[in-house]
Amino acid sequence: MFERTRDLTEAGLFIDRVTIALEGREIVSLTRRVAPGGVLTVMGPSGAGKSTLLAYIGGFLDPVFSARGRVFVDGTEVTALKPEDRHMGVLFQDPLLFPHMSVGGNLMFALPEAVCGRAARAERVAQALEGVGLAGLETRDPATLSGGQKARVALARVLASSPRALLLDEPFSKLDAELRAQTRELVFSKASESGLPVLLVTHDEADAEAAGGDIVRIGV
Ligand SMILES: Nc1ncnc2c1ncn2[C@@H]1O[C@H](COP(=O)(O)OP(=O)(O)OP(=O)(O)O)[C@@H](O)[C@H]1O
């Protein structure tokens, strides 16, 4: 259940004394606040625990880890909630589009139930695609899209779900340099426009620089 706390009602994402251990060894220990529209970039060597931290915040940490600490979004504690009840948009390296659905179907699936009626839902999908420069692609089979287009559909799908925060786990790493730069500009501008706090996990210093926010280095 939601717990309102009087002293933590600030907007954004708050990571409050989160510690994560594997086989009794602490691998992550972090307290940070990410303002709406701000980015916290998590860097560190392979195996340091970056994806593990993101998984804890998203609510899908593997039970092999033991973890403590609280996660708040806009002053509401989400630590005990299921991933789908945290309303966090997650993007991974792979766009993970549903292959058996059209591009429009992928977005429609993500729309909140509160968007009612066929016409209103179709309009919301159209707007989301337009917002990432893919207007009119509703009927396309995801398999026929380029890598960059797939990444944009994944972003549009996440934004269509009306998230309260974005969790990005190396979402640009499969794109070539030029596409990578374009896609990350689009992601950060959309997040900032929507006032979403972003947690970015990356190996890439250029990603961190483009993100423009605080950088936390773990495992170093
Ligand atoms: N399901 C699991 N069971 C056991 N150990 C795991 C599991 N998932 C991850 N680990 C271990 O936990 C540690 C942290 O992994 P994590 O994937 O968070 O690292 P990372 O910093 O994201 O690495 P990379 O940059 O390579 O993606 C690693 O030592 C990894 O081997």
Image (tube, rainbow, N blue to C red):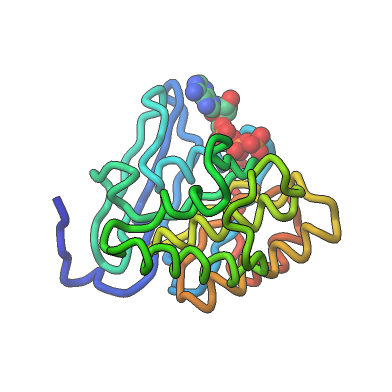
Residue at the far bottom in the pictured view:
193
Residue at image coords 23%, 44%: 80
Q: Nearer the viewer, residue 181 or 56?
A: 181
Say left or right for 187 vs 177: left
| Residue 46 place in picture, x, y as percent | 68, 35
Whether residue 184 is visible: yes
Count of marks overlaid on the render = 0
Name the quadrant of the C terminus. top right
| Above or below, comparing residue 35 to residue 44 in the picture | below
| Above or below, comparing residue 28 to residue 24 in the picture | below
Residue at image coords 71%, 62%: 183
| Residue 110 place in picture, x, y as percent | 41, 52
| Ligand 1 falls in quadrant | top right
Say left or right for 13 vs 101: left
Whether residue 48 is visible: no
Q: Nearer the viewer, residue 100 or 59?
A: 100
Residue at image coords 65%, 45%: 44
Residue 67 found in image quarter: top left
| Residue 45 place in picture, x, y as percent | 69, 40
Q: Nearer the viewer, residue 200 or 70?
A: 200
Residue at image coords 64%, 44%: 142
| Residue 100 place in picture, x, y as percent | 54, 35
Say left or right for 14 vs 154: left
